């Protein structure tokens, strides 16, 4: 799943550690989500979006195999 967490963190001058502390996860979890290595739970995704004051869809974009193939 693609995401724009790094972009939103930069816009809010926030480190991974600060975001992690705010939503009560580890910095490693934030790093893994940003890199696309881990898909967050609905609760974590909601808390990230709430922290930045935006809808979940503004941060996370689900990309299935058909979407990826269509762009090639």
Image: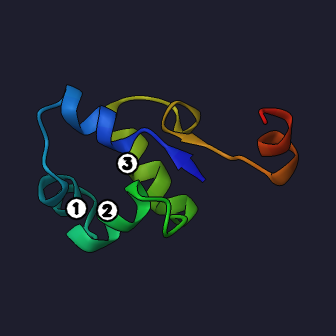
Crowding at mark 3 (Cα within 10 Å: few <14, some 14-19, many 20+)? many
Residue 13 pos. (x, y %): 11, 33
Residue lying at 42% horizontally and 61% vertically, measured from the top left: 33
Residue that numbered label 2 is attached to: 30
Residue 30 pos. (x, y %): 31, 62
Nearer-the-camera pick, 23 or 13: 13
Residue 19 pos. (x, y %): 21, 53
Q: Is residue 39 left or right of residue 17?
A: right
Question: Distance of mark 2 from mark 1, alpha carbons?
Answer: 6 Å
Residue lying at 77% horizontally and 44% vertically, measured from the top left: 68
**SS at badge 1:** helix
Mark sitting earlier along the chain (2/3): 2
Name above or below for residue 41 compared with residue 62. Answer: below
**SS at badge 3:** helix
Residue 48, label in figure: 3
Q: Is residue 29 left or right of residue 4?
A: left
Q: Are marks 2 and 1 in contact (CB under 8 Å)?
A: yes
**SS at badge 2:** helix
Residue lying at 19% horizontally and 55% vertically, measured from the top left: 16
Nearer-the-camera pick, 16 or 65: 65
- The quarter of the rendered structure image containing the C terminus is top right
Task: Tell which tag, 2 or 1, sits nearer the viewer.
Answer: 2
């Amino acid at each position: 799943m693609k995401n724009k967490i790094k972009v939103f963190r930069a816009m809010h001058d926030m480190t991974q550690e600060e975001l992690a502390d705010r939503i009560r996860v580890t910095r490693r979890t934030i790093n893994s989500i940003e890199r696309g290595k881990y898909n967050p739970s609905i609760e974590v995704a909601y808390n990230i979006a709430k922290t930045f004051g935006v809808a979940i869809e503004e941060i996370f974009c689900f990309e299935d195999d058909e979407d990826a193939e269509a762009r090639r």
